[in-house]
Image (cartoon, rainbow, N blue to C red):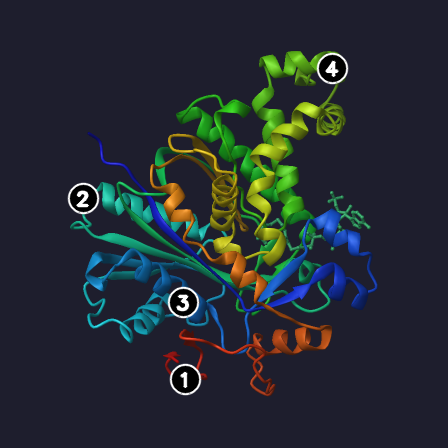
Amino acid sequence: AMTTVGIDAVEIWAGKCKLDLPGTFAPAKDEDPDKYRKGLGLENSSFPDVYEDIVTMGANAAKRLMEREGLEPDDIGRIDVATESAFDNSKPVSTYIAGCLEEVYEDDFHHANKGERKFACIAGTQSIDDAYNWIKAGRNRGRSALVVATDTALYARGSSGEATQGAGAVAMLISEDPDLVELSTEQGYGSADETDFLKPNQQFPSVDGKRSMQVYLARMREAVEDFESVAWDMHPEDFTYIPFHTPFPGMVRKAGLLGYRHMIRDTEIEDDLAGEIGRQPREGEYEDWDAYEAAIRDYMDELKGTDRYQAWYADTIDPTLSIAREVGNWYTGSVHVARASALKAAAEQGRELAGEKLLVGSYGSGAQAEIHAETVADGWKEEIAQLNIDDQLEQRYDLDFEEYEQIHDVHNHDMTVDVEEFTTPEGEFVFAGRGRMNERL
Ligand code: CAA
């Protein structure tokens, strides 16, 4: 039989502080809380405490994953870190994380290949692809790959992006015969040189927020078409869940509607809806492209209000957003949090998903989208039951606005700010100071 390769285990580590967006941030900015709750779809952003950074969050997620899977360093042949928050232009963050892990294991990771992947938020998925290829090529010597997606997604204060911050890490084990999901061989890409979001030698991104949303949708659309050219014409009922990269849930609302519109074209669903909202505009029916686009927008506005679409959205997309609503954007980890949210929701409802399909829409600014399918594996329920993310979210320290500004300064590598920690670390890796090793308490 053909070997299946995919995600065997997943762990999530949320930054230990939170900023209440409708409750604390909106009033401080003199904004309507509904911009967050209803517009962006966000309740809280997660922030790292003063002793957390991309290394500690990634290492803590990886350690918990290794412990509960009973793994030793010898079981892992490669460690890749995906991040857009790296502080070192030479040494990959994976060396720092391996260094932390070596303090708690008797053996070391000298045998393991280490690297760092960068393409904005899509790098986590690219690292999984690298691991997949490495295993499929037979180079893994029976070992698994550890992929860590870790970011502190902070924007300059006063910029539009400040509304969509977040911090956390996702650790994933990529193996043969995985317990969680198997990856499809087929992939679709949409990739172009874009300048809507970038950080050339700077700490915070330069971002054209509105344009970044257009670029997300344009590249995602190309990736869908490219995927269909190697896989099949997709239908809304093909997928139990569709986790997308989630900079904020409102973005996924737009991507979901566009995807649905695409998938129902020339299907019985379009026919069924025709009596209510008409058929989709066809390009040839309009004088020019602008008129056609305007007609499509009107059609989508109508489509959004139909019971049929709303039921599909509630079943297929909304369950992917429950963690994102509480943590904001985690950049590279975000799409992997979306997958975990959906599987967690299914487990809580007692559903059986083994053999069902997910469609995963990853995206990175700059810009590239990737689409692939996944098949839920037999061990998914036991695996997802191990997550303790609800407890982590519950235990976060609720920052007031002034404390938020202090934390923001600390993570802007401002060495002049001296801020007391808000929470107490417990048996975890902590940042011990610049130029010193991360150490375990
Ligand atoms: N009640 C209900 N809804 C409200 C509201 C209210 N009182 N006030 C505002 N809204 C709605 C708005 O209508 C809008 O929704 P629509 O887009 O559907 O119209 C939404 O809330 C946001 O409001 P604004 O557009 O006024 O918000 P903003 O000007 O602060 O900009 C943003 C939002 C552009 C996303 C900004 O937060 C930003 O720049 N974020 C960073 C960039 C980003 O996340 N881009 C996403 C695509 S790129 C990507 O995905 C990669 C990545 O991770 C960065």
What residue is at 32 percent from the left and 69 percent from the top? 95
Q: CA distance from mark 4 to mark 3?
A: 53 Å
Q: Nearer the viewer, residue 141 or 191?
A: 141
Looking at the image, tell me whether mark 3 or mark 1 is earlier in sequence order: 3
Neighbor class of circle 1 (other Cα within 10 Å; few <14, some 14-19, many 20+) is few
Q: Position of residue 333 (x, y in %)?
A: 48, 54
Looking at the image, tell me whether mark 4 or mark 3 is earlier in sequence order: 3
Q: CA distance from mark 4 to mark 1?
A: 64 Å
Residue at disc 3, CB closer than 8 Å to ligand 1: no
Name the secondary structure under disc 1: loop
Label total for image:
4
Q: CA distance from mark 3 to mark 2?
A: 29 Å
Looking at the image, tell me whether mark 4 or mark 1 is earlier in sequence order: 4
Q: CA distance from mark 2 to mark 1?
A: 39 Å
* Disc sitting over residue 138 in the figure: 2
Residue assigned mark 4: 278
Q: Nearer the viewer, residue 148 or 327?
A: 327
Q: Quadrant of residue 419?
A: bottom right
Looking at the image, tell me whether mark 3 or mark 2 is earlier in sequence order: 3
Could you tell whether 386 is left or right of 176 in the image? right
Residue assigned mark 1: 435
Amino acid type for the residue under numbered disc 1: Gly
Foreground tag (4 vs 3) = 3
Given the current orientation, which residue lies at the most extreme left position? 141
* Disc sitting over residue 106 in the figure: none
Q: Is residue 233 above or below residue 98?
A: above
Amino acid type for the residue under numbered disc 4: Gly
